[in-house]
Amino acid sequence: MADDSLFTKVQLQTPQIESDRALLRDEDLLNEEHLRRMDQVLLRRNLDHVRMFSRKLSLELQQYVHLYTPEANELRRRIEKYMVMERMIEREMARRHTY
């Protein structure tokens, strides 16, 4: 009979993509009040992620999706949304004079 007390649960580290998704919450990045409350490090990190995701989507649109499919329209909508987030973050950083 094995003793169950010998086995302990190990907390696994969350994958990077999961932490990126948690970091990049659209409702926070599209809300100027939330941007004002973010500290400088988080604001800069979110700017990096927004830029990275918008570039990835642009590459995907250019390379893998036919330009007239519904998937292409969805990618264009998402790219535009990330570009709006990028401009809002840059505006907040400029307001703080830290950009």
Image: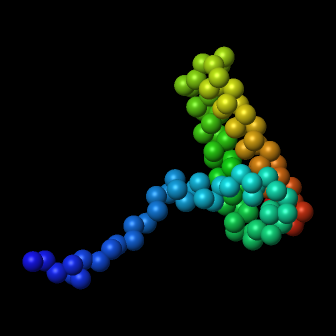
Q: Please say whether residue 93 is visible from this viewpoint.
A: no
In this picture, is 70 found above or below 35? above
Is 56 on the left-hand or right-hand side of 35? left
Q: Quadrant of residue 60?
A: top right
**Where is residue 52 shown, x and y percent of the image?**
63, 47
- Total labels drawn: 0
- Residue name at image x 63 percent, y 45 percent: 53
- Viewer-closest of 55 and 66: 66
The picture places residue 87, in percent across and down from the top left corner, at 82, 49
Q: Could you tell me which residue is drawn at 46 percent across and 62 percent down?
A: 14
Residue 59 spot, x, y in % from top left: 60, 33
| Relative to 96, 24 lies left or right | left
Q: Position of residue 25 (x, y in %)?
A: 68, 55
Q: Is residue 12 visible?
A: yes
Q: Residue furthest left?
A: 1
Q: Is residue 53 above or below residue 2?
A: above
**Which of the colour schemes (rainbow, by chain, secondary structure, one colour) is used?**
rainbow
Q: Nearer the viewer, residue 88 or 26?
A: 26
> Which residue is outermost to the front?
1
Task: Determine whether, in the image, residue 14 is placed left or right of residue 81.
Answer: left
* Up-down relation of residue 40 to residue 71 (above or below): below
Please report the residue visible at 58 percent of the width from the left and 56 percent of the height from the top.
20
| On-image quarter of the N terminus | bottom left
Q: Quadrant of residue 82?
A: top right
Q: Is residue 43 left or right of residue 63?
A: right
Task: Classify residue 96 by image quadrant.
Answer: bottom right
View extreme (right): residue: 95
Image quarter in which the C terminus is found: bottom right
Which residue is located at x 58 percent, y 23 percent?
65
